[in-house]
Image (tube, rainbow, N blue to C red):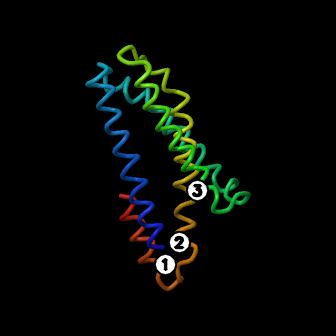
Amino acid sequence: FNAGLFTTLVLQTAILSFFVTMAITLQVGYGFSPIRAALVLLPFQLTAVASSLLSARVSKRLGRSVLQLGAVLLALGVIGIMTTLTLVGTTLRGLELLPALFLGGLGFGLTTAPLQSIILSKVNPRFAGSASGSLSTMQQ
């Protein structure tokens, strides 16, 4: 349970702060409007929603290994974003980021949705309220 809380804290902190930084970078560094920056990053969020909805089926097949799969896809997506920004330089239009955003969103959805169930699965029902409250706190 404690390892799961720590994992949630690290995952949420890293990814959410990464996308705040990305939004600012797109606006200040590349001159995108706030709407354009949001539209560029939208594929990540849409893919994350779709993959989180599918994660229950994937979890049934892979068990806890779905977390490793999701983490690897998420890491590859973030590395892809960083690589794309480095290679494209100041001529970024936004479309170049699509493959990496889709990959990262897929990984994020496959990680976050089952992570909650896996963390809470071993908690004594007597402590379920406190455990879910602690998990929610770590997510926020």
Lateral position of residue 129 relative to residue 28, left or right: right
The part of the image, by quadrant, that contains residue 138 is bottom left
Figure quadrant of the C terminus: bottom left
Residue at left offset 52%, top offset 54%: 112
Task: Calculate the distance from the C-alpha at mark 2 to the C-alpha at mark 3.
Answer: 14 Å
Crowding around mark 2 (Cα neighbors within 10 Å: few <14, some 14 to 19, many 20+) is: some
> In the image, residue 31 lies at what x, y percent?
29, 19
Up-down relation of residue 104 to residue 96 (above or below): below
Name the amino acid, label 3. Answer: Leu
The numbered disc on residue 120 is 2
Task: Calculate the distance from the C-alpha at mark 1 to the C-alpha at mark 3.
Answer: 22 Å
Answer yes or no: do the residues labelled 2 and 1 have beta carbons within 8 Å? yes
Lateral position of residue 49 relative to residue 60, left or right: left
In the image, 29 versus 120, the foreground residue is 29
> In the image, residue 119 lies at what x, y percent?
52, 69
Lateral position of residue 1 relative to residue 122, left or right: left
Dot 1: element: helix
Name the amino acid, label 1. Answer: Ala
> In the image, residue 117 lies at what x, y percent?
56, 66
| Residue linked to disc 3 | 67
Name the amino acid, label 2. Answer: Leu
In the image, 127 versus 88, the foreground residue is 88
Dot 3: element: helix
Give the mark nearer the N terminus: 2 vs 3.
3
| Residue linked to disc 1 | 128
Residue at left offset 46%, top offset 25%: 84
